Amino acid sequence: MLWLVLWLLAGCGEPEHTIRRTLHAGDQWRYTLTLQGELRGQTDTLELRYTDRVLSVESDGSATAERTLQMEPDALQRLQASAAPFGELKPKTRWRLHPDGRETPLDEGVFVIGAFAYAYPDRPVRIGAQWGRVERVGSLELKYLCQLEGVETLDGVECYRIRVQVEPMPDSLPEMRGEMTVYVDAQSGWTRLIQGKLNMRAGAVEGDFQLILRGEPVGEKR
């Protein structure tokens, strides 16, 4: 009983963390998404590179940003074919970015690349805290179960480490489930790294995917 009381008191003493993205005009972040998948017995790897540039910031902290894809034409064409059911991939688009991780396209019918809102809790949280989000893109509807595991240094930068369990909602098509680890820059709130494994199923078709997304501010010195 004494051990339990001490454990509870220690937990209450943990500091709270507000995980929010801070947006400034002129901010630029460069991302590389590598997706390796095995589907119908064939293995394929796609790499998508894009840069987000903040154009202006509103009084509520949200911002207008320009997203520029940086891919070889043949790779972009292959990715456009895969993304077709969920929207159109355009070389340059405009977005509304929010401090809570939401990303709203300002162009109609575009494919949502980023959208890591699940990693941003709607309240200050302590290490060990859990939260959930449901997000839908077209017919794909997923539940994200998240937990703040700790604060650690990644490439010399202090980051929040968040464990994410992915589960399909009952009517989701395709079904997707898996697990990811997300690292959010503790100072700026931008996503630094996502790595994980996902399984996708649509009827008799099933595939396994490994993904790695790396982000860094443009001009950052290594």
Image: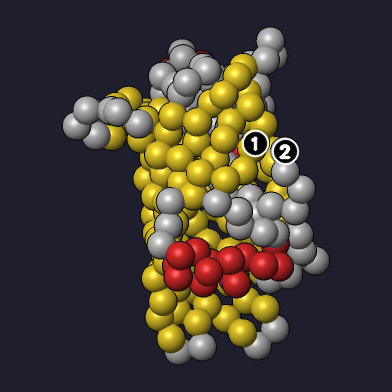
In this rendering, is residue 204 above or below 18?
Answer: below
Q: Which residue is mark 2?
A: 106
**Of marks 1 and 2, which one's residue comes earlier in the chain?**
1
Residue for point 50% across, 31% down: 53
Q: Nearer the viewer, residue 220 or 172?
A: 220
Q: Is residue 91 visible?
A: yes
Display colour scheme: secondary structure
Q: Where residue 154 appears, x then y in whole percent?
A: 28, 34
Q: Which residue is mark 1?
A: 95
Q: Nearer the viewer, residue 86 or 180?
A: 86
Q: Nearer the viewer, residue 78 or 167?
A: 78
Residue for point 50% across, 36% down: 52
**Going by the picture, which residue comes out furthest to the right?**
171
Query: Which amino acid is tagged 1?
Result: Trp
Query: Which amino acid is tagged 2?
Result: Leu
Label 1 packing within 10 angstroms: few (<14), some (14-19), many (20+): many
Residue for point 63% across, 50% down: 112
Residue for point 77% across, 64% down: 139
- Spatial CA span between label 1 and label 2: 5 Å
Give the SS element for disc 1. strand
In this rendering, is residue 93 above or below 71?
Answer: above
Q: Is residue 6 visible?
A: no
**Going by the picture, which residue comes out furthest to the left?**
222
Label 2 packing within 10 angstroms: few (<14), some (14-19), many (20+): some
From the viewer's perspective, tell me whether residue 78 is left or right of residue 192.
right
From the viewer's perspective, tell me whether residue 20 is left or right of residue 152.
right
The quadrant where residue 129 appears: top right
- How many numbered markers are drawn? 2
Give the SS element for disc 2. loop
From the viewer's perspective, tell me whether residue 83 is left or right of residue 27.
right
Tell me if label 1 and label 2 are in contact, CB under 8 Å.
yes
